[in-house]
Image (tube, rainbow, N blue to C red):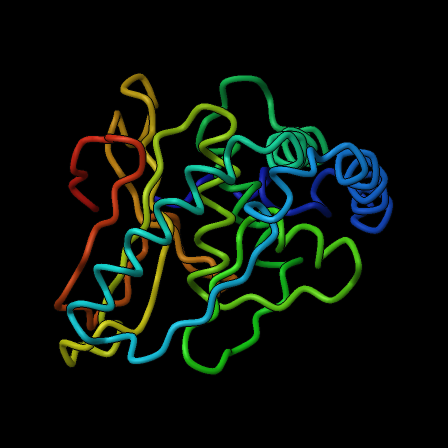
């Protein structure tokens, strides 16, 4: 079930995205200046890997993605960006599906999707800094890392989902995973997949040809059952 679109369409609340994003950039300026020097290298790095689909490399990638989310969600820049998005989209308190929808909407419409050579993985902080500078360039895995980190920074259990979107048994796509609270009206504590590279897919949508899934858990979250 897709969340009520009044929470994910800025025009519905007459939100000026340019003004909203300008406020986010001003906040980021302060956070970037105050970033501890000994953490900056860890938080802003990019890592490139090749031969993505070998079993050994997928294990390495899963560990890398997990660490990027683990450290990313602890950044003040990431948390304040998540909070800024919720305020900018005017999401009421405890509207969990609205919060997730707003973060997804902001990423899909603001983080520029660009294919990479091999597999280039960027930390959430790196992606936000590049966005602030007007040079964002992320593919599905980077956008999913950012989504998982933003949601985790405001208290959600998150993870990542690797799939063979073309149904050929070869992993070629990454999605976000997030768990809704048990009292959520629609999903009642279930894990849902989040597509970050398409604007018009429902919350919980997974490529219909998918036959293979690899779930990457973050920080000891229980193994999810994806819708």
1, above or below 171, in the image: above
Residue 177 at what x, y percent from top left? 33, 45
Q: Quadrant of residue 50?
A: bottom left
Residue 169 at what x, y percent from top left? 13, 76
Q: Tell me the residue at 15%/81% (across/down).
A: 168
Residue 17 at what x, y percent from top left? 78, 49
Q: Is residue 25 left or right of residue 203?
A: right
Q: How many callouts does the rendering have?
A: 0
Looking at the image, which residue sits at the far front? 38
Q: Between 162 and 203, which is closer to the camera in this rendering? A: 162
- The quadrant of the picture occupied by the N terminus is top left
**Residue 48 visible in image:** yes
181, above or below 144, in the image: above
Q: Quadrant of residue 163?
A: bottom left
Q: Tell me the residue at 70%/32% (across/down).
A: 84
Q: Between 40 and 22, which is closer to the camera in this rendering? A: 40
Residue 126 at what x, y percent from top left? 62, 53
Q: Tell me the residue at 81%/38% (across/down).
A: 33
**Residue 14 visible in image:** no
Q: Between 1 and 153, which is closer to the camera in this rendering? A: 153
16, above or below 156, in the image: below
């Amino acid at each position: 079930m897709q969340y009520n679109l009044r929470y994910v369409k800025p025009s519905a609340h007459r939100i000026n995205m340019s003004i909203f994003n300008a406020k986010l950039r001003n906040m980021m300026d302060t956070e970037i200046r105050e970033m501890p020097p000994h953490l900056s290298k860890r938080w802003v790095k990019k890592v490139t890997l090749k031969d993505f689909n070998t079993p050994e490399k997928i294990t390495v990638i899963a560990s890398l993605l997990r660490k990027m989310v683990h450290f990313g969600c602890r950044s003040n820049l990431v948390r304040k960006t998540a909070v800024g998005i919720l305020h900018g989209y005017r999401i009421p308190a405890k509207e969990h599906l609205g919060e997730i929808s707003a973060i997804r909407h902001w990423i899909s419409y603001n983080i520029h999707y660009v294919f990479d050579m091999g597999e280039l993985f960027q930390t959430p902080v790196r992606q936000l800094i590049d966005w602030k500078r007007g040079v964002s360039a992320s593919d599905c895995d980077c956008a999913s890392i950012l989504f998982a980190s933003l949601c985790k920074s405001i208290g959600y259990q998150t993870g990542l989902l690797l799939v063979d979107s073309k149904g050929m048994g070869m992993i070629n796509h990454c999605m976000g995973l997030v768990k809704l609270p048990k009292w959520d009206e629609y999903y009642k504590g279930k894990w849902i997949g989040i597509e970050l590279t398409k604007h018009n897919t429902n919350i919980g949508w997974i490529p219909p040809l998918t036959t293979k899934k690899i779930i990457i858990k973050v920080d000891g979250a229980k193994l999810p059952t994806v819708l």
